[in-house]
Image (tube, rainbow, N blue to C red):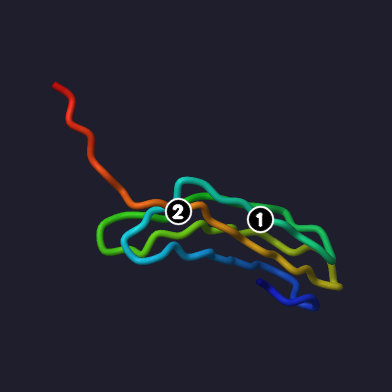
Amino acid sequence: MVPAGTSGFASVEALCPPGEDPLGGGYSVSGGPLDVIQSEPIAGPGINGAWQVSGNITSSQGASITVWAVCAKAGSVTVG
């Protein structure tokens, strides 16, 4: 969460538990407007999965940003 009173660029992540990757995610904003630049998963070899939201807080009063991730363990499927 980015505390109220903060303005300018902000990036917030919701981390997945170790061994899990983000399937989806989202965010909520209160206290001021946010121009979202990205809202996307972060995952890959050697990276703890997360959902990341980045943007510009455009109010001098700042904003509070809460980010969440829906995570699951990656698996494999054999087709044949």
Residue under pointer 1: 27
Q: Can you say whether 21 is above or below 46 in the image?
A: above
Q: Quick one: which residue is furthest to the top in this view?
A: 80
Residue 38 badge: none
Q: Amino acid at mark 2?
A: Cys
Identify the secondary structure beneath mark 2.
strand
Task: Provide residue 45's location: percent of width, then percent of height.
Answer: 25, 57
At a point 42% along the width and 55% down the height, the residue shown is 42
Is 74 or 53 nearer to us in this picture?
A: 74
Residue 53 coordinates in the image, percent (x, y): 59, 58
* Residue 7: quadrant of the picture: bottom right
Q: Quarter of the image holding residue 29?
A: bottom right
Residue at x 65% of width, y 59% of height: 55
How many neighbours does mark 1 have within 10 angstroms: few (below 14), some (14-19), or many (20 or more)?
Answer: some
- Residue visible at 67% across and 64% down in the picture: 66
64, 8: nearer the viewer: 64
Residue at mark 2 to residue at mark 1: CA–CA distance: 15 Å
Q: How many marks?
A: 2
Residue indicated by mark 2: 71
**75 sits to left or right of 49:** left
